[in-house]
Image (cartoon, coloured by chain):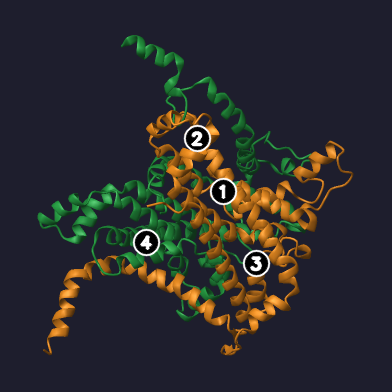
Chain colours: A green, B orange
Amino acid sequence: MVQRKLTRRFSGLRNRGVNPSGFHTSQIKFYILLTPITLFMLLPIIFIFSHAFKPPDELFAYPPRFFVTNPTLKNFTDLFAKLSTSGVPVSRYLFNSVLITVTTIVATTLVSTTAAYALSKKRFRLKQTLFAVNTVALMFVPIAVTIPRFLIIEKLSLMDTFWVHILPGLAMPVGLFLIKQFIDGIPTEVIEAAQIDGASDVAIYGRIILPMIRPAIATIAILTFQAAWNNADTSTLYVNSENLKTFAFYLTTLTTTTTGANAVAGQGIAAAASLIMFLPNLIIFIFLQSQVMSTMSHSGLK
Amino acid sequence: MLTSPISAFRRWIQREGSAYAFISGYAFAFIVFIVTPVLVAFFLSFTFFDTIQAPTFNGLRNYIVLLTQDEVFMRYVLPNTIQFAVIVGPGGYLLSFLLAWVLAQLPKIPRTILALILYSPSMTTGVAMTVVWKTFFSGDQNGYLNSFLLELNLIQEPIQWLQSPQYLMTIMIIVTLWSSMGVGFLAMLAGILEINPELYEAGSLDGVSNRFQEIIHITIPSMKPQMLFGAVISLVSTFQAGAIGVTLSGANPTPQYAGQLIVNHIEDFGFLRYEMGYAAAVSVVLLLMVLFFSRLANRLFASDD
């Protein structure tokens, strides 16, 4: 017995193939293959960090240098000291972005989880049809219907309101799909037992379903976060009042004015702003990645 | 007899009412912001509409003009879109499958770190990324690529990368591939890790002798649903990424239409020329293209059961 364990350990049987538990020499070739690709993916990310802390002379040094040598917070202080051309402080854009993102996440999670619960566990006539429609909508390319959306938003008098940031992205077919697949994995017996105990639908949803689908909620929260936080289009198309625009939009104004006389002032601020845009994405994903992976294993499309 | 429709309605409410209540929020947003825009696009595509006067019906005119008279569409937009979509779509998809497969061969900790690195560019969609790439491909001698090539004496003077028709498309493809390891990639990685290891053992008894055969005969057939999910996601994000040429070059139309994709064509006609009916016809063509390619993916990865 002991001998078998030992041969197994030293021949590295369990360390080969898919999902190995430890290192084995056969993995070296994969690391060699992955290294250049990983570097290519990583360099721009490192650049965002490095660039944001460069003092002006390094930002415009010739030849340009990739890494920062004398890091400074000047770009960040400049960013927050600056008023946009229309007199709105940058912190206002940031505040809008945070508020809009949080509201969108809460609203999207609520409508997606309730709908997914009904589509997965309730019995009603249109159930199959509605899920099929949602599956077709996975192929929906929002950018293709920018114009009709614009007309609808205008008709609904949503132009220039806070809600125009929230409502158009509320229904996210991928989100509903992933949560529904995840709820399918919860045995029906659990719900039937609760029903026998007299639990209402709301109680089943709130006390049984929600706690059991935390990974799926984390996943949709991340997807919604990325969509809402990085969204500059809504501010460009549907919002005129500067007070209601987002930080992502502010960053686009910086990048479009970095040519010409404004370039010197703009570059450092834009670099700092990009880091502020990127960092929350990264942090949230690092914290929630294991939940995302467990949701993704339910993602199959049959 | 008179009460029966009412009592039938009551029974229906009792039986199915709560289910509809639960989906109502999502259904409302779905109908208003997904279904209606598609229907409106379809309707407007048969009209002339300049946003000032009410749309007037003009039959198939928009489609006929698009196919026979729109030189920009036929000469630049359509070939560009197909080139971009074919390389970024299947290319990015294949790349994410291969990377997912390679990652699955590694132990958990290095796998998680590497997956995070590969996934992170897809988080930088749009704005943050353009700052980076615009600096890198900047047209003066301070641009990173120019400075590097000047140093090596490979070029004599700086190249206007983002303004040159001959480079813009390549740069768009590279940048899009860079950020294409998204949700589909994670789904495929999870799918590969989920496969029952006994299948591989059984495969080796059945004569599967190398890793390539293993991928073809065991891995892919066992994760068809994830493969299809990944395909749909990569398809949508490919067409959704269409705005990148305009973002990088800073102009719509892009220099000599070199980076003009169908999405930019819609915007050009819709928001710059206010020919909404015509733009809607282009939108419908785009939606049909996505649908066509999804069908194709469905054929490839349809589950047997």
Instruction: State the CA–CA distance, disc 1 to disc 4.
Output: 31 Å
Question: Which numbered mark, 1 or 2, is in the foreground of this view?
Answer: 2
Mark 4 vs mark 3: tell me if same chain: no
What amino acid does circle 1 point to? Tyr
Mark 3 near mark 1, Cβ–Cβ under 8 Å? no
> Is there any visible trace of residue A223 in the rendered image?
yes
Q: For numbered disc 3, what is the local secondary structure?
A: helix
Name the residue at the top extreme: A3
Horizontal placement of A152 versus A58: left or right? left
Of mark 1 and mark 2, the one earlier in the sequence is: 1
What amino acid does circle 3 point to? Ile
Q: Answer few, some or many: residues within 10 Å of disc 4's Cα (few below 14, many 20 plus, some between 14 and 19).
A: some
Q: For numbered disc 2, what is the local secondary structure?
A: helix
Q: Which residue is mark 1?
A: B93
Mark 1 vs mark 2: tell me if same chain: yes
Chain to which the residue tagged by mark 4 belongs: A
Question: Which numbered mark, 1 or 4, is in the foreground of this view?
Answer: 1
Q: Which residue is mark 4?
A: A107
Q: Which residue is mark 3?
A: B262
Q: Is residue A11 above or below residue B19?
A: above
What amino acid does circle 4 point to? Ala
